[in-house]
Image: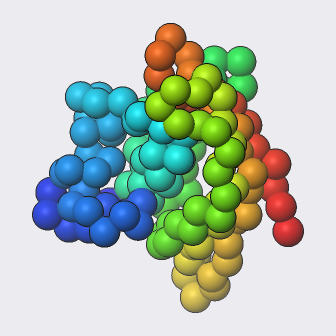
Amino acid sequence: MTTSSTAPCPCGTGKPYASCCGPFHAGTAQAPTAEQLMRSRFAAFARHDAPYLLRTWAPETRPASLDLDHRLHWERLEILCTTEGGPFHQEGTVEFRAHYREGRSTGALHEHSRFRRDHGAWVYIDGDIRD
């Protein structure tokens, strides 16, 4: 999926991709909070950007590779709750609901994710799927 620099970012902030998650994906900036990392990872899933997802995954839980299903279209992200994860924290959590479409079917992934700073940068550790 390509996104023009003026198109709204897939993460749902309403900002243009070029001034929202684009710099994170390009490696020219780092997400300042756990929530922003979560948003940028959602946008990476929406854009099928496996290298960014792997780069922002904690080394001890990161898979060796990531094969993203191009039939799955991530459409909308809801941030339900955050704990810590701010600019002055070392750990944080983000509970979210990510809505997707696959063909004519729709669904949502509800997850409570854990994040931490790794050499100053936020990384995704793991998550618990919720009903």
Q: Quadrant of the C terminus?
A: bottom right
Q: Residue furthest bottom?
A: 104
Q: Which of 98 and 79 is in front in this view?
A: 79
Would residue 71 be seen by someone viewing this image from the given angle?
A: no
Q: Which residue occupies 81% across, 55% down?
A: 129
Residue 127, x across and y down, in percent? 75, 44
Q: Quadrant of residue 116?
A: top right
Compared to residue 18, the image places residue 120 above or below, namely above
Would residue 85 be found to the left or right of residue 10 on screen?
right
Q: Nearer the viewer, residue 113 or 62?
A: 113
Would residue 85 be seen by someone viewing this image from the given angle?
A: yes
Q: Which residue occupies 14% across, 63% down?
A: 6
Would residue 96 be found to the left or right of residue 42 on screen?
right
Would residue 89 be found to the left or right of residue 25 on screen?
right
Residue 48, x across and y down, in percent? 43, 51
Would residue 32 be found to the left or right of residue 26 on screen?
right
Q: Which residue occupies 24% across, 28% down?
A: 28
Q: Which residue lies furthest to the top in this view?
A: 119
> Which colouring convention does the figure follow?
rainbow
Q: Quadrant of the N terminus?
A: bottom left
Residue 32, x across and y down, in percent? 41, 34
Residue 59, x across and y down, in percent? 63, 18
Q: Which residue occupies 21% across, 61% down?
A: 16
